[in-house]
Amino acid sequence: MTEPEGADDLREAARPGAGEVTATVIVEAPAERVFAALLAWERQSDWIPFTRVRVVEGDGREGSRIEAVTVLGRATLRDEMRVVRVDEPYEIGVVHHGQLLRGPGVLRCTQLDRDRTQVVWHEWFHLPGGRAGRLAWPVLWPGSKLGLTQALKRFARLVEQGRLP
């Protein structure tokens, strides 16, 4: 049996990188509803600024290919992901395998009580640029953390308002 095209590249991208960032939010909603909102990939465009997300292949679950394109002025960042794990209603695992963004990521839901769920978004990016990328990471990290945190806060508001999924 042969492996699918790009399997070696996906395995390499799945190794955690040195650029680690985590954001957390509490959502006043049950875990099942929060998880369904996270799986609504195209709706991420509603809560991640300047970004359009689409399912390129599959149904959004394990094995699916997802593309997120962020445009800020003349700069465009294309993030290609493969969904590698869906453990409903607890965890979604992805591997970023594009040219610039590479590494594993996870979205975790933990129900705290009947109508309260903690969401943790964790990424382990490979840093481009070798030594220069590693030196730049401490400067870039606060912006990455702030961006993830603000996006999750927007996500929580939309779920709590019933506007997601």
Image (spheres, rainbow, N blue to C red):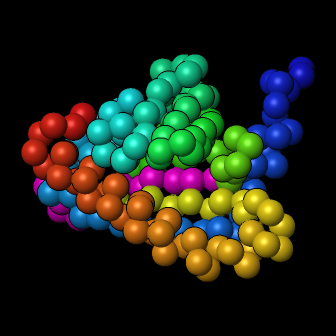
Which residue is at 65% across, 68% downward?
Answer: 19
| Residue lying at 83% horizontally and 67% vertically, measured from the top left | 130
Farthest residue, direction right: 2
Front-most of residues 120 and 158: 158
As drawn, is 133 to the left or to the right of 146?
A: right
Q: Position of residue 133 (x, y in %)?
A: 74, 69
Please tell me which residue is depicted at 15% across the width and 57% down the height of the picture.
28
Judge whether 124 appears above or below 54 on screen: below
State whether residue 165 is above or below residue 24: above
The N terminus: image quadrant: top right
Residue 40, image quadrant: top left
Residue 162 in sight from this viewpoint: yes
On screen, residue 157 versus residue 126, left or right, reads left
The C terminus lies in which quarter of the figure? top left
Residue at 36% x, 39% y is 44
Let me know if residue 143 is in the magenta part.
no
What kind of secondary structure does the magenta stretch mostly adopt?
Answer: strand
Residue 6 occupies which quadrant of the picture? top right
Q: Is residue 163 left or right of residue 42?
A: left
Residue 71, position in %: x, y?
A: 49, 41
Q: Which residues are magenta?
A: 104-118
